[in-house]
Amino acid sequence: MFPEEFDYYRAGSIDEAISLLGEHSDGDTEILAGGHSLLPTMKSGLSSPDSVIDISRVDEMSGISVDGDTVTIGATTNYAAVADSDEVWESATCLAEAVSKIGDKQVRNRGTVGGNIAHADPASDLTGAFLASNGTVVVQGPDGERRVAADDFFLGMYATAVEPDEIVTKIEVPKTGEDTVGAYVKKPSPASGYPIVGVGAVVDIDGDTIQSARIAANNLMDHAVRLTPTEDALAGEPATEESVAAAAEIATDDLDEMMMMEDIEASPEFRAQLANVFTERALNAALDRVESPTPAAAD
């Protein structure tokens, strides 16, 4: 299928993109980065924007840097760059592992981190890992730049805290220390590779004791969510398979099963069961890295 006719604009800078958004605020305007979310919806007729603003060649929005305690990834940085970065694997393992599991090589070479976060697909691998990693989304609009914590960013299915006159310019993730481990695991759909349920875990360890954990799941609810019962149960517990198994059993205890995602691949009941199982697997995978080196991108 072909999309409806639209006006196309290519921005050369962040300021120009924001200016174009303002100029076309009276119509339906979409931002184009990698195009893997927008173009299929336009071709299917689910989206028919009057204008498309292409930010894919805005150099200031691309790249990866590790500065002090923060990993910064530009919004138009493609998945492949993140998945191939030893710095991201070492400093934000959960995030890197999730990105490495997105789609196939062709998708990873074109899809962008910022586009993924802004699209807020509940089935996205990245959203759960980003939430578990305690990330921050940097957005910019006519009133300047602001930062939104991941906990406050995802509001619902395809809904975020980005205002209509703002764009996502980059994401930031705290650099993990020597006593922090992370992992992301998922139950992939055999048809699409999207997670039926995915779970990201970032765990702080002190000797043989779990100090704290951030755990988040995607494609369980209408947006990525923290699994706080398990987080609370693990604090101060020994870093053992028994402690992990007991905490994982209550992963979804504070979530309404009636509101869980339901489709031809899984019922809410099955998704709740998968969430418990893959929470346990994500935690064990993370704890296995206490003794083993963090995997390099090439692995």
Image (cartoon, rainbow, N blue to C red):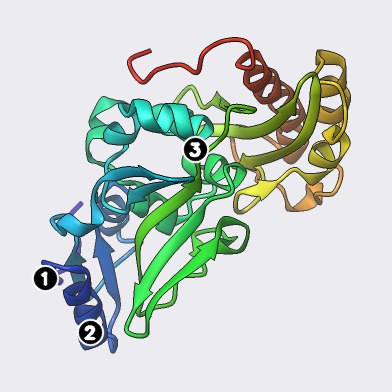
- Mark 2 or 3, nearer chain start: 2
Residue with the mark numbered 3: 125
Residue at x 16%, y 59% (from the top left corner): 58
Task: Give the structural element (helix, strand or loop) at label 3.
Answer: helix
Gap between marks 1 and 3 measured at Cα: 30 Å
In terms of depth relative to the viewer, which is nearer, 145 or 53? 145
Gap between marks 1 and 2 measured at Cα: 11 Å
Gap between marks 2 and 3 measured at Cα: 32 Å
Callout 3 amino acid: Asp
Where is residue 84? Give x, y as percent.
30, 26
Callout 1 amino acid: Tyr
- Mark 1 or 3, nearer chain start: 1
- Contact between labelled residues 2 and 1, with CB atoms less than 8 Å apart: yes
Residue with the mark numbered 2: 24
Callout 2 amino acid: His
Local packing at callout 3 (Cα closer than 10 Å; few below 14, some 14-19, many 20+) is many
Residue with the mark numbered 1: 9
Q: Quadrant of residue 291?
A: top right
Residue at x 44%, y 31% (from the top left corner): 96
Task: Give the structural element (helix, strand or loop) at label 1.
Answer: strand
- Mark 1 or 2, nearer chain start: 1
Where is residue 18? Give x, y as percent.
25, 77
Instruction: Tell me: 295 left or right of 153.
Output: left
Local packing at callout 2 (Cα closer than 10 Å; few below 14, some 14-19, many 20+) is some
Q: Quadrant of residue 17?
A: bottom left
